[in-house]
Image: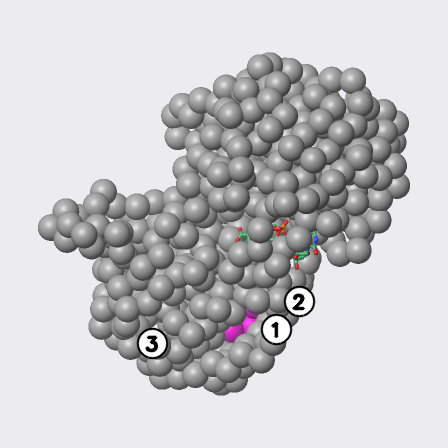
Amino acid sequence: MEKIYVRGGAPLRGTIRVSGSKNASLAIMAACLLVEGRTILRNVPDIRDIHNMAEVLRELGATVRFSTDGVVSIDAAGFQETNAPEELVSKMRASFYVMGPMLARLGEGHVAQPGGCNIGARPVDFHIRGLQALGAQVKAEGGVVDAYAPRLRGANIYLDFPSAGATTHLITAACLAEGITTIENAATEPEVADLVNFLRALGARIEGAGTSTVIVQGVDKLQTNREYTIIPDRMEAGTFACAAAITRGDVVLENVTAAHMQPVLVKLQDMGVSVTAIGADVDAPGLLRIAASGRCNAVDILAMPHPGFPTDMQQPMVALLALSDGASMVTDRVFENRFRYVSELQRMGADIRVEGRTAFVHGVDRLKGASICATDLRAGAALIVAALAAEGESTVSGVEHVDRGYGALVEKLQMAGADITRVDSDHPSRLLAVG
Ligand code: EPZ
């Protein structure tokens, strides 16, 4: 079993390159099934979830080729399978997004119903209700969702909650539907806007990218042989920013779109962290300098749908707050059970109390290295951030969760001066290729 070993105390210094967005890439890869030919994606992160999605697409008849750094070619001319493989879909919730293209191109789809995970129940009722509004007959029984639609028809859809996944999935399905679809109370996350911009680049007719009302005018086909560059991963960037802050380092992040990170950057500045966007255009990928010389101030955080503070960043932030000066209240209004990692931080000496959707954090002077276990990818990020500043050595297990969303994490942190290694604990003499 692989483990990550961290000896805390080294301030991070130097430059760290941020990869492309996991969540934008997953939505866009599924949407490539709409195309009766080849699409080239750039800046795709090399992480486990991306390879899982590639496997799903291949099982459905598409060809997926990874070439040089971050370039992926997807050819969906051969997409004809309407049964998504349960063993693959059950690994990753985003696989459910293939249902929309199945209905749009093949008229039916059979996809395992994603289960809950370590952060909540995570039903797909908004997805199902939206597909039904688009004219599909949908049945969810025995852990499988069966859907039929000879032709999807435009509809007015109102989401009870601005669900990122449901918004991306329904926009994708509506692209080839007959007529106009309006999605109200849509998610406005940058990853959703990136999907819309991708589809528009292929000839889809969509207005309202990144707003809470998205209007899709169905077209007959999308264009083939188009290329698209995925936005940077704001959560990976935010995690490195927390790591720089907690170690009182001074780091320049490369390939970061500062405008996508506004809620996190404002909080870091309130905590006394120096945040400097280098370059003129904060709306385009550029450089971001993060530096801290002392202990951070405590702040309160309310994780909400965008443009609120992102739920995927509350975990690394709580790790940073655990060593801050003062008391913080962190509430997650998006997922009902996203504080399981707190018990691992408590093993390191963190003073945190969780009541329902809120963690009450009292900053302590020091954390002690410990053997800790990641229960999901963002929890793993939080534990590694804490371990980078803890006294002594920490052993982090559950590395497979971290690999789902962070590519070459150990290597990137090593390059910035962290004392971190990755070892196959069944064969300790064999130091694994970093990252
Ligand atoms: C996406 O998950 C992301 N995953 C999550 O990132 C992210 O935390 C989340 O959006 C919120 O931003 C991907 O993009 C692959 P939601 P998603 O639908 O789409 C409830 C990470 O760490 N809900 O916005 O599943 C749901 O239970 C992952 O990278 C329904 O009730 O999130 C949750 O409470 C974790 N019914 C809330 O809405 C539905 O049909 C928001 O979920 C759908 C969602």
Compare marks 3 and 1 and give the one earlier in the sequence.
3
- Distance, label 3 to label 1, CA atoms, is 22 Å
Mark 3 lies on residue = 348
Q: Residues within 10 Å of mark 2 (few under 14, many from 20)?
A: some
First to last magenta residue range: 267-271
Residue 61 at x, y percent in the picture = 54, 20
The amino acid on which the numbered mark 1 sits, given as a three-letter code, is Arg
User: Could you tell me which residue is drawn at 40 percent across and 23 percent down?
Assistant: 67
Above or below, 247 against 213 in this view is: below
**Does the segment drawn in magenta span residue 268?**
yes
Q: Are marks 3 and 2 in contact (CB under 8 Å)?
A: no
The amino acid on which the numbered mark 2 sits, given as a three-letter code, is Arg
The colour scheme is one colour
Q: Is residue 277 visible?
A: no
Mark 1 lies on residue = 357
- Distance, label 1 to label 2, CA atoms, is 7 Å
The quadrant where residue 153 appears? top right
Q: Are marks 1 and 2 in contact (CB under 8 Å)?
A: yes
Mark 2 lies within 8 Å of ligand 1 (Cβ measured) = no
Residue 89 at x, y percent in the picture = 54, 39
Looking at the image, which is closer to me, 139 or 425? 139
Above or below, 131 against 179 in this view is: below
What mark, if any, has residue 333 been given in the picture?
2
Q: Residues within 10 Å of mark 1 (few under 14, many from 20)?
A: some
Position of 68 with respect to 202 (left or right) is left
